[in-house]
């Protein structure tokens, strides 16, 4: 039973990416050396350890919690907005969450379906994925990535919303192109459903399929580019100050764009045949997820921390944390582009000698980044314990209903519907 | 305290639950859709079931040779010895060819196996016509038993000129457990 507990704890705790969960889950099990669901498929077809059944149970629970949370978010946003607030008046963070919740509702059931098929293959003698019984392991990849690709946008869209709240605050300008931001987010969400096979260009697809998935994938760069240019235009000629949330947000825009560009390189089919399953891919998705999603979460923590605790955090320490993280992330992940292009494959416990130096650099960066998060923890605890009292508005240029109430927010807020400041929510 | 517009909320919730159920079903619908896709495109090198030679025969293309290579693999912990009689053959498109594959069971118990074929390049899969193949049925071998399994095939004369070498690969799966549970039912 201890296995089940190990397995469930990380999975229940959050609706983070299921691959992260599965790696946490499976890495802690001696029976499997799996790092992703695909490797887990291998356990189903070949070894069938009992841990896989626990893992599937955990994925089902996590899926149910994500779906219920998302339904709650959508119902709340569609039916319970403050009187007079139209959809196009909502803060962009709310918009991105609405779209993220829709994505979750649409794809989590598909993941539930694919793990159910695995369960049936293990226990009920079906052969969805075992070729020995007439199934097809590549089918697993298709169904998994039909879930998996929208899932990566689930991880980044709320980050877009956070950055769209923070940059206007510290540039002291309205967000440039609010409407186009909403439509770009919706377009990214739609496109995420029709590009899944770019994760599996090398499985052997008809050339027409390769071309379609290549062009459809490249198309995503258009709405994403709209967003990046909007953020840049928001900063343009703004009265910018660089408090810690803004530092993380600006770093997000720059480093996420680097990750996006390597993604564009990976979308080119003939190039992908070379890059597939190398550290170049690892560098790509870490650039979009670490200085992408995680930096935006840190930006959000610093941005709203005074509202949560009623105290200002220590700005000097916050900036120190930012610079350590910024340097650490880049030292960790940038060299992985080089070793990936030089041919170092993913998912091996060892590597050829010529990759040792860059791996060493990567390790140094990872330690800097990892340990600097202890500083973050310290800053948050210090802020909770006390500090300079925060005003209601906290930030000079902040707009939105949360800045009209006391810091920290009282136990009951808006027991009577708030008066909206005249159409300035955007 | 009653929430405002309770009815609207219930309606939205029910609609979303409907989407969830629909998408769960869609996940399973992808299985037959994928099979159709593979049949149409020949993706994954899947070959068709037994081929029947048309009444008026097939014209032999005497102008070119096609090399057919044979590969054998054992899936996971399959202990059988499994190999082709010849590693490759030069054949004329349209001609009937015959070869055999050798299998023996060194395990201490009777086992059932299923061979799964795959053709590379995969767009050539539809031009590989098998009139007789051990892969159409399951093989049961007792301890120490060996068998020569026949394969008769024709390469379609319409095989694109660009394909000069075809690889036919067989992977042998241990399906003893599957057949045992089926027999128990």
Image: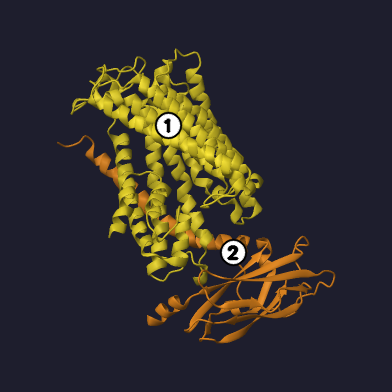
Chain colours: A yellow, B orange
Counting from the top left corner in percent of width and height, residue A123 is at: 37, 68
Counting from the top left corner in percent of width and height, residue A334 is at: 55, 35
Q: Residue at x 59, y 76 (%)?
A: B135
Q: Image quadrant for the C terminus of chain A?
A: top left
Counting from the top left corner in percent of width and height, residue A305 is at: 30, 26
* Relative side of A209 to B156, left or right: left
- In this rendered view, identify the residue nearer to me: A51 or A128: A51
Up the image or down, B85 lies above or below A277; here it is: below
Is residue A69 visible to the viewer in this orientation of the structure?
A: yes
Residue A101: name its quadrant.
top left
For label 1, the residue is: A295
The chain under label 1 reads A
Q: Dots 1 and 2: beta carbons under 8 Å?
A: no
Up the image or down, A142 lies above or below A180; here it is: below
Q: Residue at x 40, y 52 (%)?
A: A22
Is residue A187 visible to the viewer in this orientation of the structure?
A: no
The chain under label 2 reads B
Q: Residue at x 40, y 31 (%)?
A: A372
Identify the disc placed on residue B39: 2
Tell if the residue under mark 1 belongs to the same chain as the one under mark 2: no
Identify the disc placed on residue A7: none
Q: Secondary structure at mark 2?
A: helix
Query: In the displayed image of the protein, which residue is found farthest to the left?
Result: B1
Q: Residue at x 62, y 60 (%)?
A: B41
């Amino acid at each position: 039973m201890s296995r089940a507990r190990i397995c469930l704890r990380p999975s229940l705790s959050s609706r983070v990416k299921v691959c992260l969960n599965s790696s946490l889950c499976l890495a802690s099990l001696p029976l499997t050396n799996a790092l992703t669901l695909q490797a887990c498929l291998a356990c189903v077809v070949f070894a069938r350890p009992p841990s896989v059944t626990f893992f599937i149970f955990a994925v089902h629970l996590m899926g149910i919690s994500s779906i219920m949370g998302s339904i709650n978010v959508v119902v709340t946003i569609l039916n319970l907005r403050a009187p007079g607030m139209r959809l196009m008046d909502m803060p962009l963070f709310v918009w991105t969450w609405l779209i993220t919740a829709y994505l979750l509702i649409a794809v989590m059931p598909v993941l539930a379906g694919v793990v159910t098929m695995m369960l049936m293959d293990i226990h009920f003698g079906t052969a969805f994925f075992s070729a020995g019984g007439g199934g097809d392991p590549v089918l697993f990849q298709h169904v998994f990535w039909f879930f998996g690709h929208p899932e990566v946008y689930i991880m980044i869209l709320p980050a877009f919303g956070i950055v769209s709240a923070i940059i206007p605050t510290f540039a002291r300008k309205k967000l440039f192109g609010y409407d186009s931001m909403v439509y770009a987010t919706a377009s990214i969400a739609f496109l995420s459903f029709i590009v899944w096979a770019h994760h599996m260009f090398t499985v052997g697809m008809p050339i027409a399929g390769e071309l379609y998935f290549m062009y459809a994938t490249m198309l995503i760069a258009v709405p994403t580019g709209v967003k990046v240019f909007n953020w840049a235009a928001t900063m343009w000629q703004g009265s910018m100050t660089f408090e810690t949330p803004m530092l993380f947000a600006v770093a997000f825009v720059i480093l996420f764009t680097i990750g996006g560009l390597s993604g564009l390189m990976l979308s080119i089919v003939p190039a992908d045949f070379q890059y597939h399953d190398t550290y170049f891919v690892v560098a790509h998705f870490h650039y979009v997820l670490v200085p992408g999603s995680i930096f935006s979460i840190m930006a959000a923590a610093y941005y709203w921390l005074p509202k949560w605790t009623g105290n200002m955090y220590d700005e000097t320490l916050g900036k120190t944390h930012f610079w350590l993280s910024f340097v650490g992330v880049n030292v960790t992940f940038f060299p992985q582009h080089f070793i990936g292009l030089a041919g170092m494959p993913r998912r091996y416990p060892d590597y050829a000698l010529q990759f040792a130096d860059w791996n060493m650099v990567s390790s140094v960066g990872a330690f800097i980044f990892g340990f600097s998060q202890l500083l973050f923890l310290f800053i948050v605890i210090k802020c909770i314990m006390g500090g300079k009292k925060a005003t209601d508005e906290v930030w000079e240029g902040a707009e939105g209903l949360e800045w009209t109430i006391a810091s920290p927010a009282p136990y009951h807020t808006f027991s009577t519907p708030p008066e909206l400041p005249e159409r300035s929510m955007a | 305290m009653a929430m405002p517009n309770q009815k609207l909320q219930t309606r939205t919730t029910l609609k979303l639950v409907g989407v969830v159920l629909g998408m769960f079903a869609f996940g399973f619908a992808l299985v037959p859709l994928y099979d159709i896709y593979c049949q149409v495109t020949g993706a994954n090198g899947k070959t068709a079931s037994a081929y029947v030679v048309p009444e008026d025969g097939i014209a032999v293309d005497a102008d070119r040779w096609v090399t057919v290579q044979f590969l054998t693999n054992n899936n996971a912990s399959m202990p059988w010895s499994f190999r082709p009689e010849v590693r490759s053959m030069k054949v004329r498109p349209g001609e009937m060819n015959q070869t055999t594959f050798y299998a023996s069971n060194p395990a201490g118990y009777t086992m059932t196996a299923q061979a799964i074929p795959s053709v590379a390049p995969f767009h050539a899969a539809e031009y590989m016509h098998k009139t007789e193949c051990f892969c159409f049925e399951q093989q049961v071998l007792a301890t120490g038993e060996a068998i020569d399994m026949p394969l008769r095939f024709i390469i379609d004369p319409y095989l694109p000129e660009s394909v000069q070498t075809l690889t036919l690969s067989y992977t042998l799966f241990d399906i003893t457990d599957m057949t045992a549970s089926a027999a128990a039912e």
